[in-house]
Image (cartoon, grey):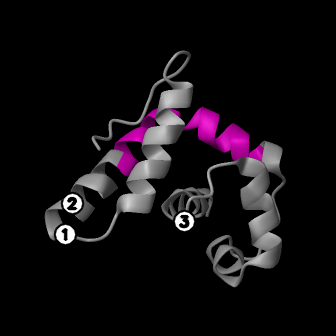
Amino acid sequence: MMVRLRVYGYASGVCSSRKMQMRRLEDAAFRYLSGDQHSDHATIAQFRKRHLEALSGLFAQALLLCSETGRAAYKMRKAIVERSSRRSSNSAVFAASA
């Protein structure tokens, strides 16, 4: 459930755990993808920290797949690149090329 929430959040430009928490209350797509479970922002952030390396590979693969198939991945690529540039100094970063 958390992976779906993260992927959809990044793809739609929502990178903040707090914003994801709020969107699950307001947005039907977020609610559906989270299985109508209501985790708080701290749980969402802890999941990201705990699984950062695996998520990095997943997002890199998703970007590669999107670019190979010609899918519009601009928003997702932009969100991941922005997020990784903020995190690059103290943790593993997403291996995305713009």
Amino acid under disc 3:
Ser
Q: Residue at x 34, y 63 (%)?
A: 73
| Residue at which label 2 appears | 67
| Residue at which label 3 appears | 12
x and y percentages locating residue 30 in the rendered image: 67, 73
How crowded pointer 3 is (Cα within 10 Å; few <14, some 14-19, many 20+) is rated as: few
Amino acid under disc 2:
Ser
Structural distance between the alpha carbons of marks 1 and 3: 18 Å
How crowded pointer 1 is (Cα within 10 Å; few <14, some 14-19, many 20+) is rated as: few
Structural distance between the alpha carbons of marks 2 and 1: 5 Å
Secondary structure of the residue carrying tag 3 is: loop
Residue situated furthest top in the rendering: 89
x and y percentages locating residue 4 in the rendered image: 54, 64
Disc 2 + disc 1, Cβ < 8 Å: yes
Structural distance between the alpha carbons of marks 3 and 2: 17 Å
Which numbered tag is attached to residue 70? Answer: 1
Secondary structure of the residue carrying tag 2 is: helix
How crowded pointer 2 is (Cα within 10 Å; few <14, some 14-19, many 20+) is rated as: some
Compare marks 1 and 3 and give the one earlier in the sequence.
Answer: 3
Residue span colored magenta: 43-59
| Quarter of the figure with the C terminus | top left
Secondary structure of the residue carrying tag 1 is: loop
